């Protein structure tokens, strides 16, 4: 991936799209975009192959904005990030495949309430490489509360219509976000990233 980024950045700088002063920032943003695209593509391909496309799509639609608002643990390397993402995908697919009705309702509610409680208590959680200032902390706190409330409202509506599979997907997104918040907070207290 380094070689690809080097070629893209050389072209952007040579053609005047990026100034030399901003090249490092643009490269970092480009690297994140490529990584997110790669992880999303792998998740969707796996979901199609395992016949869980809608469940994974709903999970991703809920999870990505929650992670952006709430913060939490971030892996030190792209490979670690990819591995963690694949474990998360495996958890979502396993839950959708092996938890059957009516257990989906009860598992969904348990994951939603446990995850929402953690998010409401500690979000947002910054990282040593990207600390929040006072204004960002307030903004991301509000966003965390709003996105969690939206997820809970969506789950309640889905429960009313007995749509337990999408409900489970959203609840897993809330719960995994909460786990990553707790991991990020523990990592911050140790003063290192895990």
Image (cartoon, rainbow, N blue to C red):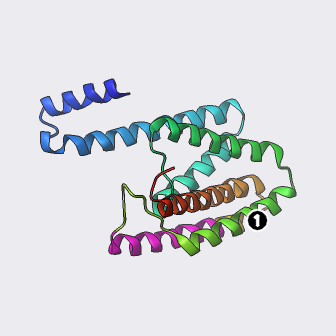
Residue 157 location, quadrant: bottom right
Using the image, determine if residue 7 lies above or below residue 145: above
Q: Which residue is mark 1?
A: 110
| Left or right of 39 in this view: 115 | right
Q: Nearer the viewer, residue 43 or 24?
A: 24
| Left or right of 13 in this view: 45 | right
Q: Which residues are magenta?
A: 133-153
Q: Is residue 113 visible?
A: yes
Q: Position of residue 166 (x, y in %)?
A: 70, 54
| Left or right of 47 in this view: 85 | left
Using the image, determine if residue 57 lies above or below residue 69: above
Q: Nearer the viewer, residue 55 or 80?
A: 80
Q: Position of residue 10 (x, y in %)?
A: 20, 28
Decide whether the magenta segment is chiefly helix, strand or loop. Answer: helix
Few, some or many C-alpha atoms within 10 Å of disc 1 (few <14, some 14-19, many ≥20)?
Answer: some
Residue 180 highlighted magenta (yes or no)? no
The N terminus sits in image quarter: top left
């Amino acid at each position: 991936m380094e070689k690809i980024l080097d070629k893209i950045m050389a072209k952007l700088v040579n053609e005047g799209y990026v100034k030399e002063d901003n090249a490092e920032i643009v490269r970092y943003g480009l690297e994140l975009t490529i990584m997110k695209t790669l992880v999303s593509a792998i998740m969707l391909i796996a979901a199609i192959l395992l016949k869980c496309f809608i469940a994974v799509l709903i999970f991703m639609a809920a999870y990505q904005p929650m992670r952006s608002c709430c913060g939490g643990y971030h892996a030190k390397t792209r490979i670690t990030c990819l591995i963690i993402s694949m474990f998360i995908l495996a958890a979502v697919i396993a839950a959708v495949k092996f938890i059957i009705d009516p257990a989906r309702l009860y598992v969904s509610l348990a994951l939603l309430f446990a995850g929402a409680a953690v998010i409401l208590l500690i979000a947002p959680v910054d990282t040593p490489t990207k600390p929040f200032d006072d204004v960002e902390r307030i903004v991301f706190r509000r966003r965390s509360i709003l996105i969690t409330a939206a997820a809970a409202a969506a789950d309640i509506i889905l429960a009313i219509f007995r749509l337990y599979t999408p409900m489970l997907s959203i609840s897993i997104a809330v719960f995994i976000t909460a786990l990553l918040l707790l991991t990020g907070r523990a990592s911050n207290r140790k003063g290192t990233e895990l």
